[in-house]
Image: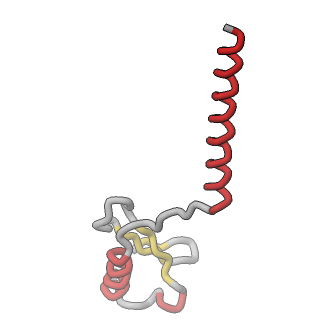
Amino acid sequence: MIKGVNKQILEVTNTENPYFEKIIFFVKPEYKNEDRKKLQKEAESLATITQKPPRTKISKKKVLATTGYCALFTLAGFALSYLINLIV
């Protein structure tokens, strides 16, 4: 364990997770005198629970905006090719 200025810090470097290299836990002040092995065991059990970060949710508004832009640019392309065919 590494002691900070006012906090006790526990660092887990073996996360067994492809996304995270290490996890840092800040021990609550009332538990700073607990057994080191017990704190380490709790930290490692918490570190192994999370395996994958949650997926980001795409809002309906963003999907509709993207669809609208695609339709708008497609129509602009058709209009431009129509105008080019009229000129030629």
* Residue depicted at x 32% and y 68%: 15
* Relative depth, front residue between 29 and 42: 42
* Relative depth, front residue between 75 and 61: 75
Which quadrant of the figure has residue 41?
Answer: bottom left
Q: Is residue 27 found left or right of 47 in the rendered image?
A: right
Indicate the colouring scheme: secondary structure
* Relative depth, front residue between 86 and 57: 86
Q: Visible in this render: residue 60?
A: yes
Quarter holding the C terminus is: top right
Residue 37 coordinates in the image, percent (x, y): 30, 85
User: Number of numbered discs present?
Assistant: 0
Q: Residue furthest front?
A: 86
Q: Visible in this render: residue 14?
A: no
Which quadrant of the figure has residue 12?
Answer: bottom left
* Residue depicted at x 35% and y 89%: 35
**Vertical placement of residue 87 versus 74, above or below:** above
Residue 29 coordinates in the image, percent (x, y): 54, 86
**Vertical placement of residue 47 versus 60, above or below:** below
Residue 18 coordinates in the image, percent (x, y): 32, 60
Quarter holding the N terminus is: bottom left
Q: Is residue 43 found left or right of 74 in the rendered image?
A: left
* Relative depth, front residue between 32 and 74: 74
Q: Residue furthest top?
A: 88
* Residue depicted at x 40% and y 70%: 11
Q: Is residue 53 found left or right of 58 in the rendered image?
A: left
* Residue depicted at x 69% and y 31%: 76
Residue 39 coordinates in the image, percent (x, y): 37, 85
Q: Is residue 33 found left or right of 83 in the rendered image?
A: left
